[in-house]
Image (cartoon, rainbow, N blue to C red):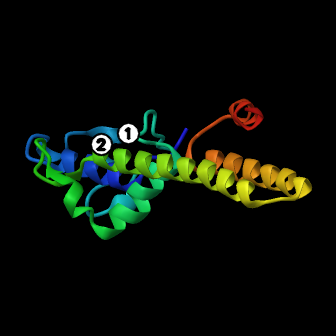
Amino acid sequence: MDDPNDYNLDYIRCFLAGIEMKDGGLIGRDAHTWGTITHPQCGALDLVSLQGGIGNDPLPRWVREKLLYSLGAHGFTKPSKAHGQRVIDEKPIHRIAQGITVCIAALLSTLSTIVLYFIVSMRLKLALIVVFNMIGSLCLCLIAKVKVPEVIAISAA
């Protein structure tokens, strides 16, 4: 199971500190499970994310966490109905990441066909087929969460 990301933990902390959840919402031993807005590090260390957000594949996660969160993601935010904090709408981010993935896949298959068209040597063609197949398999593993049998099936096709 994945660890919850900082953005989602901040969202929960803001929700618990909001007006609707008087005095933090939780009492007793559970009061500091998520940490607080002023002391986020005091939360429990064994939190897990049972269901990730939309697009929990590696590329959408990278686009969301590294690119958009660090840039502020102003074009992808909307005010939350629960506490007014601006939250990131993950649906357009997921669509953008899927578009990037499709473009990479199409470019890779087209590029391999074009390169093989101009190669005369049969040995070099076979070697390049192996190289492009390995690059395609590597891209599958890095961009999408695929299992080994799926990679083998796609490589064999």
Between 118 and 25, the one lying in front of the other is: 118
Asked whether the residues under the numbered discs 2 and 1 touch, taking CB atoms below 8 Å apart as contact, a structural biologist would say: yes
Tag count:
2
Residue drawn at 72 percent across, 54 percent down: 117
Which residue does the numbered mark 2 point to in the structure image? 91
Residue 72 in sight: yes
Between 119 and 136, the one lying in front of the other is: 119
Specify whether 90 is left or right of 123: left
Which residue does the numbered mark 1 point to in the structure image? 54
The location of residue 149, given as percent across then percent down, is 73, 30
The location of residue 88, given as percent across then percent down, is 25, 52
Specify whether 115 is left or right of 41: right
Q: Secondary structure at mark 2?
A: helix
**Label 2 crowd bin: few (<14), some (14–19), many (20+), radius 10 Å:** few
Placement of 115 over or under 130, stated as above or below: below
Looking at the rendered structure, the kind of residue marked 2 is: Lys
Between 106 and 55, the one lying in front of the other is: 106
The location of residue 71, given as percent across then percent down, is 31, 69
Specify whether 122 is left or right of 149: right
Specify whether 22 is left or right of 62: left
The location of residue 114, given as percent across then percent down, is 65, 55
Mark 2 to mark 1 CA distance (whole Å): 7 Å
**Label 1 crowd bin: few (<14), some (14–19), many (20+), radius 10 Å:** some
Identity of the residue furthest to the bottom in this view? 71
Label located before the other in sequence (2 or 1): 1
Residue drawn at 37 percent across, 45 percent down: 94
Q: Quadrant of residue 65?
A: bottom left
Residue 33 in sight: no
The quarter of the picture where the N terminus appears is top right
Residue drawn at 81 percent across, 50 percent down: 130
Q: Secondary structure at mark 1?
A: loop
